Each structure stands twice: as structure tokens, then as C-alpha cells.
Image (cartoon, helix red, strand yellow):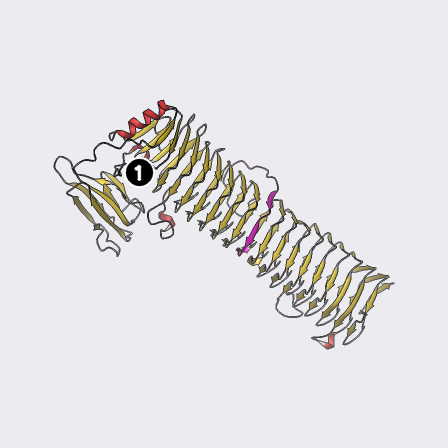
Amino acid sequence: CFRSPNYPGNYGTDQNCDFTVEQTAVLSVNNFETEADYDVLTVNGVPYSGVLGPNRLVVAGSDGEPGLITWASDSSVTKVGFEICTSILEGDSLGPRCRPDNVTFVRSAAAEAFLTQLEDPTVSVITVTEDLELDLSEPVIIDRALQINGACAEGAGAGCVRALSLAPPACSARFMDFNSAFLAFHAGANVTLRNFRIIAHATLSAEEGARAAFHSCTFEGTPHGCNGISITQAALNVVQLNGGEATFENCVFNQTCAQNDGGTVVALHQSTARFEACDFAQTRAVYKGGTIYAVGSDISLDRCSFSQTFAGDMGGAIYALDSEISLEGCSFSQSEAVNHGGALYAFDSDVSLKQCTFNATEAGAQGGAIHVRSSGDGIAIPAVPAATPHPASVEECSFSHSHAEDGGAIYSFDTDMNVKKSNFSQTESSWNGGAMHVQKAEISLEGCKFTETDAGGYGGSLHANEAEYTVRECSFSKTTAKHKGGAIHAAYASEFRVYNCSFEDTEVIGNGAGGSSGNGGAINTFFDYYMLLEDCSFSRSKAAGKGGTIYVEDADALFLKRCSFNQSEAGAQGGTIYGMMSKDTHIDNCTFTHSEAGWAGGAMFFIDSTLNMTESSSAHTQAGLRNPEEGNGGMLMSINSLVTSTNCTFDRSSSTQNGGGVYFAKGEKLAT
């Protein structure tokens, strides 16, 4: 073996070393990490730097002279360097290459041309000029650049034009192995590859008009993987689509990295990519799209899995801009983005997700699993034509253990969203929306379950800002927030409608009774134009401050119809409901049982509001349990409000001060 000076410590600056190879040998890279482009190991005249060393290259002397390997470092940054071992080959030459007899070819003219070039070691770039289909019953090896339909395009990359000398394996144990090669599919190409293994960051490129299909192929990254590599030194994308069409079935993508965007796939210029039953593991990108980066393209994934994917900016697994993204039956585990969209970030894109699972995904800012938006709001936007996306669709999906600063699982900005029959479990946000955060959009939730979701600020499950919310047949259980809205927080919402939903054991922890925090054990709303709760049930809701179940401030209209409230508790006022400046409040056919307030209003507390109660009842409500001196209104306390009660009953209410049932402090008007 030979090593850089001082290995495994860092090599020095301004070094120049020569290594000689006396016999023909195959190089095996154990470790390779140098300053990219500046500290260079040169083998067979080809420079290597960064994290991709000359693995499996053959080094041989010529004209009786030994083979030469040179090393040179510059005057600045140093790194660990390299350790490379050699295996001696018998004889002085590689001899003729093996003709693979275990390959099935379709369209034999192209197949024969392909085989002829493959057998000839002097051909540096294998060119296929006609449609070709390969089906390997056993793997085969290709050790040079493979060009489909045409010469290398200018600027396509050094791997496209240089010959690589790899050790030919025995004929009985071959791999179709693209090692640091460049696969270019030009217009008119129609190629199908099966059972190929593509390693060490070969690059596949499909231009407009080209079609490529991959079946049961493996795409592998650097020998020592991505996790131990500084992402600023990562390699190039594996798949680059520039208007082409590619299909991947039963393929594996492992330990692939990108220096910029798209750890595995970059799709541009109206490209189309289809992935079916594919696995993506340990993929990384320095900026956007830890696995896939799509701009103006159509991407669909069916029954694919993503694990341990990472993006240094947005889209831990997938980044989409002005694209169509469709996912069905896909799973995401331990996907992470430094900023937005732990698994998926979509901008001005049509997004459809069905029967997908998201587990332990994380974003440093917004959208622990998913981030969708249709306008900038301070985020840099690439200069591309913007589409008008359809509402994002999330159906029969599950989210668990996801985390973000805002929107523990989902964040939506200026993008309407429909979420159906989806489950959110143990998702959390450091600030707003333990499960979801929606701003400037219309959101529809139907048949969803929220369990043990938590927000460090507002909205244990849902947070809405300048949004319209419709929630149907959903359940909220053991959801918590620190400041406001144990399950839901809505601010500046034009409409807020909740139908046939259940809330159990929801809580706001707060900063203690009477403060501005800790309000709305289940729901907290501020400046809502219209709010409706219909056929909902609330049990064991708790707020440290005001409104054990509901806190309403400055609402134009509040309607509660056929709702039940049981075992609600507030540390301050309004054991069940606290309303301030609620201009038009209607409570119709609702029941309040076992409700208590630490201060006033055992069930309800209203100030500067208008309240109309019809056919409603209360029982076992209490006020003043924590502060007996303020314990007014065992069932209701009203300050400067107009209260109308029709056919209502208040039973077994008590207070420590005034008004065992109802207490009017000042300026009240009562109609019964």
C-alpha cells in the first residue's frame, strides 16, 4: 500500500511526491480525501482530487519503464489524504476483453456494434448509434464512457472523453459496472438497460427526445459513502435529465452525493422521470433536493423508499420547482433539510401524495416533512416561469416523529391543500403548528387523526394565519401547545369551520393563570371573521390561562351548534369558553358539564361581546377554585355584554363569590 505523507494525519502543504509501480497492478482505494482541484493525485495522466480516488484502476509501465503516480499539494488547505493498496496482475498486459455471452440484445445490429467496441481495449468511448436493449442474466462490466447516439457534447464532462483502465474480472463473475463514466442519451435514443450496476458517480444524461429505461439496476456512490464526507466535497449527480424521459424500475440508489442540487437525480427542461419500487438510501446534496431536484419537470414515484437523505438547504429528499410531483405508496425515514421541507419542498408545483409514510423527518425552519408554497415571502426564487398549481393533495398518509420550527409535519404558504384520511402522531414544532402550519391559503381536512402532537408556541396540531380552514370528521387526542391553542390556533382567518370532530385531552401549558399566554385548551382564535363549530365533542380540555376549551378574540361571528363540552378547566377565566369582543356569538343545543375556572366564569366568560344561547344546558360548573376572591359566575360571567338566553338550564353551578349561576359585572343587558 502507499499513503500520503503523515497519513492518517493531514498531509502538508507544498508537497510533491512520486510513486512508481514496477508491475502491472490494480489500485484499491481505502480512503481518499484531498482539497478538491488543488491537492491532486495523478494516475495514468488523469488527476484525482476531492473524495473520488482512482479505485480499481490498472497501473502499468510501458517500454520497460515503471508506472508513475504523482502527488502534489498547494500552499493552503490540507486534509487526511489517501491510503491506496495494490494487487499485482499476472502478465504485462490485460489481454483481450471477455465477450459477454450472457447478455440478451434486441436489434442485433446495434448489439454487434456494441459488442465489437466492448471487446476492443483501444476504444475509449463506446458509441451506440441505434436503439439498443440489454438484458443481463448475469452482470457484465463496462469500464469506459458509454455514448448513446452521437459524440460527446461540449462541456459534458471529463468522464465522457477519457478512457478508464479497469481490471477485467473473470468471465464467470462480471458486473455491468459504469465506473466514473459518462452515459449520454441524445435525441432519438431509445435504450433499455437491465441488471446493471452503476458505481462511483458515473453520470447518466438524457437530452430532449431521448428515452431510457432501467430495470433492476444499482446506482452506488463513493466507496466510503456520503455520511463521512463533507458535503462541500461531494461528487456530481448520478442522473441528469435535460428534457429526456427516463424510467427506473426496481432500482437501488445508494450513497450518492451532489456538490450542489440533487443528490441523485436532476430533472430540467420538461423532463419526465418515473420511479417504481426504487430504494434511495444515504443520498445528500449541498443545497436543494437531497435525492431529487426537479425544475419544470414531471416526476412520479410509486412504492419507493427514501432513508437517511439530506439537503443543506431545502427538500431533504425532493425539491420541485414549477413541476408535477406524484407520490404513491412511498416511505420517507430520517430525511432532513437544514431549512425547509424535511422530505419534500415544492414551489409553484402540483403535488399529489397518496398512501405515503413520513417517519423521523426534520427541517430546521418550516415543514418537518412537507413544505409547499406559491410565493416567495423572503425566500430566494429562481427566475423561471411560475405555474398556477392545483391544491396540494395528501391522502391516506401518515406522519410520525417529524419536527420543524413551524409546521411539524406540513407547512403551506399561499398554496391550497386538501388532506384526507391521514394520521399525524408525535409530530412537533418548536413554535407554531405541531402538525401543520398554513398561511394565506385554503385548507381542507377530512377524516384525519392527530395524536400527541405538540407546539412550543401556538397550535398543538394546526396553526392557521390568514387562512380559511374547513375541518371534517377529524380527531385530536393528547395534543399540546405552550402558549395558545392546544389543538388549533387560527389568526386572521376569514372562515374557520369545524364539523363532527372530537377533541380529547388537549392542553395549553402556558405561563400561569391570568397571563396573556396559556389560552384555549383546544382552540384559540384571533380576529376571525367567521367561526363555526358543529356536532363536535370536547372532553378533558385544559388551559393554564383563559378558555379551558375555546378562546375567541375579536370574532365577527361565532356559532356553536350541537357541541358537547365535558371536564373543561381553565386556570383563570372561562372554564370552557372565553370570549372577548366576540361581536355575534350563538350557542345552540350545546351541553357543558363538569367545567371549572380558577377565577371567574365556571363554564363561560364574555367581555364586550354579544351572546345568544338557545336550548343549551350546563351542570356541575364551578368558579373560584384557585382564586376564591375572584370566583364570580359559577356558570357564566359577563362584562359589558349583551346576553340572550332561550330555553336554557343551568344546574348545580357554584361560585366562591357572586352569581352561583350567572354574574353580570357592569353594563349588562339580559334577555331570557
Q: Is residue 15 left or right of residue 432?
A: left
Tally of numbered tags: 1
| Disc 1 residue type (three-letter) | Arg
Q: Quickly name the residue at label 1.
A: 174
- Magenta stretch: includes residue 194: no
Q: Residue furthest right?
A: 672
- Magenta stretch: includes residue 397: yes
Q: Is residue 507 left or right of residue 665?
A: left
What range is drawn magenta here?
A: 382-405
Q: Is residue 137 left or right of residue 167?
A: right
Of residue 177 and residue 380, the one placed in the foreground of this image is 177
Q: Is residue 36 left or right of residue 613?
A: left
- Rendered-image quadrant of the C terminus: bottom right
Q: Residue furthest left?
A: 64
Q: Going 79% across and 66% down the picture, which residue do you hit?
A: 618
Picture quadrant where residue 658 is located: bottom right
Q: Position of residue 126 (x, y in %)?
A: 31, 29
Q: Confirm whether residue 461 shows in the render.
A: no
Picture quadrant where residue 616 is located: bottom right
Q: Position of residue 533 (x, y in %)?
A: 73, 55
Picture quadrant where residue 387 is located: top right
Q: Going 75% across and 60% down the picture, which residue do you hit?
A: 564
Is disc 1 surrounded by few (<14), some (14 to 19) or many (20+) residues within 10 Å? some
Above or below — where is 340 with respect to 654? above
Q: Position of residue 58 (x, y in %)?
A: 23, 40
